[in-house]
Image (spheres, coloured by chain):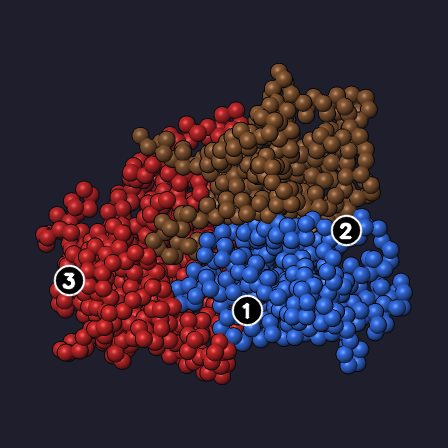
Chain colours: A blue, B brown, C red
Amino acid sequence: MNAPAPALWRKIDPAVATAFGCTILLLFLGSLYSSSFLSPEYLLQQLKVASFLGVIATGMMLVILLGQIDLSVPWVVAVGGMMSTAATGWGPTGEALAIPFGVACGICLGFANGFGVAYLRLPSMIVTLGVNAVAQGLMVVHTGGFSPQDSSSDAMRFIATGHTLLGIPNALIVWALVGGATVFLLSRTTFGRAIYGIGNRERAAYLSGVKTQRVVLFTFAIAGGLSAFGGILLAGYASKAAQAMGDAYLLPSIAAVVLGGASILGGRGSYIGTIAGVILITLLQSILSVIQMEEAGRQVIYGAVIIAMLLLYGREKVAR
Amino acid sequence: MSDWRYRLGEHRGTLLAFAFFVLMFVIYASNHPVGFTANVVQTAANKGALLALVAMAQTFVVLTAGIDLSVGMVFVLTNCLASSIVIGSPAMVALGVVGVLLTGLVCGAINGAIVIYGRLQPIVTTIATGAIYFGIALVLRPVPGGDVDGTLSDALTGRVFGVIPTSLIALAAVVLVIWVPYRRSAIGRAAYAVGSSEVAAYMSGVPVRRAKFLAYVASGLVASIGGLFLTFITASGEASAANGGSYTLYSIAAVVLGGVSLFGGSGSAIGAIFGALMFRTIGDLLFVFDLDPLWQPLFQGLVLLAAVCLGSVRLFQIRNRLDLFE
Amino acid sequence: MGGSAAPLFQMAGVCKRYGGVRALEKADLTVEAGQIHAILGENGAGKSTLIKIMAGVVAADEGRMLLDGREVKFASPAAANQAGIVCIFQELSLVPDLSVADNISISNPPKRFGLIDRRAQRRIAEEALARAGAEDIHPLAPVKDLALSRRQMVEIAKALARNPRVLILDEATSALTAADVAKVFVVLKRLRAEGLALLYISHRMHEIAELADQCTVFRNGHNVASYRAGEKSDNEVVELMIGREYSHVFPAKPPLKPSDRPPALEVRRLAWSDRLRDISFGVRAGEVVGLGGLDGQGQRELLLALFGVLRGVSGEILIDGAPASISSPSAAKAPKIGMALIPEDRKTEGLMLPMSVSVNLSFAALDRISNRGVIDRAKERELIDHMIELLAIRTDGTNVPVGSLSGGNQQKVVIAKWLMVTPRIILLNDPTRGIDVGTKAEIYQLLRKLAATGAAILFYSTDYDELIGCCERVLVLYDGAVKRELVGDEITERALISSALNITTSGGADMASAVSA
């Protein structure tokens, strides 16, 4: 690849094209198995499921653009789900505030992540791991170790499972709104520029007069809020929260961002790529389960596909 | 003569990890309801040795500025394999052990080959290969079960002279046979050089690729020793995703607590081992203070955060803010 | 060129392309044993590519390399080292976390029973450091704890420990103190007497004049001239390098006008740690004030302290006569203060190399072209185009990565990026290091133009000629304090050097003895 690699997040790069290409290939292979893979109902259902991962991966992408990583996703997702359902159980006011309350809890945890990374200069891998453990600890204490009994509020169910005009799932609309806001943030605001700048070279960004620590802090906070929001959607979808509800979202969210062409080292990546990665991964998981592949086989294929795709286009340039 | 100052500086992380571990363990043992008995030590040692081995495996890769997120899955996979093949006649047991270690070696080699020759980032690569290894483990053990050779198992998880846990002796043997020669070999130093600055290492004619590849291979090998050991302790195999995931994450925590830099180039597996033992002791502290076990995860998380925050004390000494961004 | 016997090393018809750009075009070079061979040329003339090919870092597309008359090909730096070609790179090749001794024998450590023999390794390190004249460096010290000039000495020791036949020094003295340079020169001359071939690349003409036996000038990837040292005057050489006449490098200094207004920037009794002591001075609008002295006497720290980067700075900073507190770069660049810093290292501090030229250009000025955090793209575009034109930045569009530009143009981007915030006080940290002559001249012109429009400029340079040519006043720092202030005609090379060395005499002989002391 000798195309000018960086910063032009509006331009479609080969990674995004390949990811979308593979999505279409997957659909084609699926349709050979069963024609229902091409039905609008199936596709909309997949997009709806993808929305949950999409919201979570959005936060992950922002953090990865900084050159950091957020391993606290599993339990921040769970916190979002559990706190919003808990709030629902506190009566009408709680029910009305369930969604903002859940998001706020996620933002708080995100601030903790961001504070450790930005101000204490700790490696994000270890800070977010610690915050994940703390979040888990808090939830274990909160629930007493049992599955939480509260159920989701109507609003949560509405945004996660409802449909509005033309049968478009509300979850998809929510994802579109989150995505639109992210694209705007990244491409049109000073904050977005700062994220890319810090991901490329924090030292240079600091010497350019950017308040880099504040940018990192708020980026992690946004990511925490988005993870929790993903948890709220999931709780709305399943009508209740569960202990390990976020476990299945850490690796896919990282994989989606990277499959979309973002560099795990930071500073490079586009939101359209993340969309492509999210859809690709959701579809892959769905197809594997539809063809009733064993869990063992699913894991192997899932891993092999990610490796194969990255070998196709995600390779670093040669030093010489 | 300021030699000692430099030598001390070189091992600072390891020594600190050791000191903290001793402190924690003294608090733990002196408050233990049953007291500081051989049994207490043996149980703690067996549990600690498992994480210590996985953390040691992680260290090899982290030193080269990489990361192995599949290390817990290799641990689980080799556990499942060992629960099937390390049994029978002595010859078969020996063959089984070799088979388990070879499997670990191959897993590490696959990681290494993809990262180095496929030029993919280690984080994503090992996430994906971890899924593959876990899938294979599931094939081997769809449900928990299996067995392991009893004599070997008892010998390696018991005590010698009634007091010293053999698991610690085994751990020390692994360190002596694998880590010490590695640390002092040219290829081991090449790994440190690569982790510290890959460009400088390449410019200096260091075999960059070979050093990185070998680090992944060593990681797989040591993780498989851990898997083998788990089988000796539990006498069964279980393809548990939660187990694999938590061992991977705890290994990173142990490595950091042990003074190994996640940016590569400094630290030692011995430090990581004490980091692992420390991490385990922290987890058990609540138990001896007779608090509600519900609080254990929260406590463990808070102590982990507090411990890593100690590393930030140096920030108060920084007078040039540019030093923050190195 | 070459004599009748086969020369030690020869390159013939070597070509190298990067993408569409030709870095080397049929380059020839002949290096004889027992000589110091200087390579001259502007940045981008192909010097770095040439030595990278020699040292096995990159492979040539075409052409041949001969060692002792036999054709050789190097697959890696290690292969080149084995053949006896060792390079001291401009970008340091030391591993920061390892000790000096580890670094010196990194590729070929002494072994016992298959493991590294630390005692022997330490002995090798001590010998090599002694050979390089750097006995003050402890072999067990981690490289990351050493100052830049000490690292450079380790680099030289490391090269010597490999017993090279051809030693390449690429701007190897750029980070050294004057005392170290003198020591290194002694070492180099000794190596020449021992029969080594030395390839010496430097932008410092007086160094080349002192050392070289043979010179080769490169321009646009091709060797344009080769001559015995001393055959050509400096002006002739510079003409060869830039391919045009070398004149009016330094613009004229307008006479100083007396003014009642307080200085744009005034510093009173500034101190920090043990690196800056009791510094007081002022810079008026329209003035270019130089910072001189040996490298590492606190000049960098002074600029960083003014820019709000250092913690625990005591003393007063006054902007237009009013006390100001500057606690971060973002405070320093705020319109109220209007300060800009062109940092030391453009690659890690000035630019985000993989990002586009336009993103880099507007990065510092984003708050000036945005409304509540939303960027006004039309305004951004306009300013970027204006800057590219104003500084004549040669770039293949504004969307290419800034890393693909030549060093000189990268530096122009750094300067332009800061001009976009329309600063009133401009701090420059050695902005012309490693930059070609043509761009240097453009930067001098620009500084003068900025001063004429009322900017106050504080300019640190390691090049004495620049200080003499550009500045109305020069503050010479020594050990963190202002040792002497030179004004107008007082700014001569002799005055700069003697006050830099903190000696009061005017004799050259005394200076030399001070260096070797």
Q: Which mark is residue A7?
A: 1
> Which residue occupies 12% across, 48% down?
C510
Q: Give how far across and how far down residue B18 sits, in percent.
A: 49, 33
Q: Quadrant of residue B272?
A: top right
> Which amino acid does the dot numbered 1 rest on?
Ala
Instruction: Judge from the rendering whether residue C343 lies leftward or rightward of residue A121; answer left or right.
Output: left
Q: Quadrant of residue C143?
A: top left
> Which residue occupies 78% across, 21% down?
B90
Q: Which mark is residue C99?
A: none
Mark 2 — on which chain does it sit? A
Pick the front one: C10 or B70: B70
> Which residue occupies 70% across, 41% down?
B74
Q: Decide: is C410 above or below C384.
A: above
Q: Which one is in front in this view, the residue at disc 2 or the one at disc 3? A: 2
Q: Residue furthest top?
A: B161
Residue C92 visible in the picture: yes
Q: Which mark is residue C485?
A: 3
